[in-house]
Amino acid sequence: MGKLTNKLANEILVKKGYFHGLDYILNEYGLSQEKERAVRRELYKYLNFKVQEAKKELVHIQTALTQMEAVCRRGEQSNATDNIYTESEGLRRACLNLEGWTISLLESLVTLEAAVLTPETAGNTVNKLKHSFAELWAIRIDDGFKMMSRHPEVFGDFGMEYFPNGSQGKHW
């Protein structure tokens, strides 16, 4: 077995995950206790940085949801006849913020999984998310979003003249 270089150690940690990788390095190459403690501290320091980053992302997610909630509450009480796009601009802006910060949080999760668990676990999470969201979207498209059918008191027979075959759920 060759000499353990910084490059090789980093490759091992990335391929095996930080803790499995460190265990492998300790078993295969050995480290002085002082070096081992220093590496462990650095691993935890890095992981704590990622945890703090994820906590900040949660604050942004909460903010976006609070903004969306406020716009929805105003809309529930509104008698406005303004352009619907003008009225809902804040909701769209907050929804885009929610999307961005949620994706950022998922990126943090995958980074933490790769480090704390294994890179394979992180890859499986990405694949599960892709599969789950594709399935969810297919169901939503197949069933329609059903806003009109969920609220007959508001919509009644609305749309039947536009969708005479009764397929409005496929379009809403």
Image: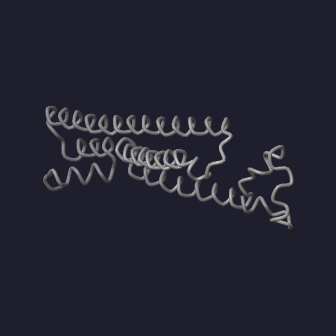
Q: Nearer the viewer, residue 156 or 111?
A: 156
Residue shown at 53% from the left, 57% from the top: 130
Q: Quadrant of residue 69?
A: top right
Residue shown at 20% from the left, 38% from the top: 39
Q: Position of residue 156 (x, y in %)?
A: 85, 50
Q: Position of residue 35 (x, y in %)?
A: 15, 36
What colour scheme does the image use?
one colour
Q: Farthest residue in the bottom direction?
A: 165
Q: Position of residue 110 (x, y in %)?
A: 41, 48
In this rendering, the answer to whether 62 lies above or below 165 is above
Is residue 98 toward the left or the right of residue 113 in the image?
A: right
Quarter of the C terminus within the rendering: bottom right
In this rendering, the answer to whether 52 lies above or below 89 is above
Residue shown at 61% from the left, 36% from the top: 74
Q: Nearer the viewer, residue 109 or 104?
A: 104
Q: Position of residue 107 (x, y in %)?
A: 41, 49
Q: Nearer the viewer, residue 31 or 142?
A: 142
Q: Nearer the viewer, residue 95 or 114?
A: 95
Q: Quadrant of residue 70?
A: top right
Image label count: 0
Is residue 155 toward the left or the right of residue 38 in the image?
A: right
Quarter of the N terminus within the rendering: bottom left
